[in-house]
Amino acid sequence: MPKAIWNGQTIAESDKVETIEGNIYFPEEAVNRAFLKPSSTSSNCPWKGQARYYTVLVDGQENPDAAWYYPNPKPAAKSVKRHVAFWRGVEIVTT
């Protein structure tokens, strides 16, 4: 079952993930929101739409903008609606 781990904590875990462009997107309900802090950062993908970010916060350590999601993805990326992906040192374990 895929897991997202940072600073020794499991942030997300689910066997119902979406994989796009090599990134694993976890369903919102599989993400422990206690480890996420909203960020003001956003970016734009030509085919997925506007992404918003979270800072991952574990044991007082912050990993800025290490999680992202598409609140209103474009039709081609509708499968990632209500999903969160991770990067910037967040380890994705798939075994």
Image: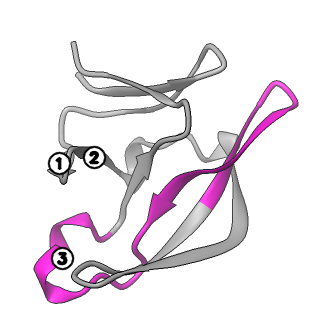
Residues at marks 3 and 2, CA–CA distance in whole angstroms:
15 Å
Q: Residues within 10 Å of mark 2 (few under 14, many from 20)?
A: some
Rendered position, 94 above or below 79: above
Q: Nearer the viewer, residue 40 or 38?
A: 40
Question: Are the residues tagged 1 and 2 within 8 Å (C-beta)?
Answer: yes
Q: Which residue is located at x 17 percent, y 48 percent? A: 19
Kindly identify the residue that appears in the image at 19 percent across and 32 percent down: 15
The residue that disc 3 covers is 78
Q: Quadrant of residue 24?
A: top left
User: Percent position (x, y) of residue 8?
Assistant: 62, 13
Q: Nearer the viewer, residue 30 or 87?
A: 87
Is 64 inside the magenta-drawn segment? yes
Question: Is 15 placed above or below 56 here?
Answer: above
Q: Is residue 56 left or right of residue 45?
A: right
Q: Earlier in the sequence, mark 3 or mark 2?
A: 2
Identify residue for label 2: 23
Residue 67: where, in percent of width, then height? 53, 51
Q: CA distance from mark 3 to mark 1?
A: 12 Å
Tell me the kind of residue under disc 1. Answer: Thr
Residue drawn at the location 63% of the way across and 57% of the way down: 54
To which residue does mark 1 refer? 19
* Magenta stretch: includes residue 48: no
**Number of marks present in the image shown:** 3
Left or right for 22, reference 11: left
First to last magenta residue range: 54-81
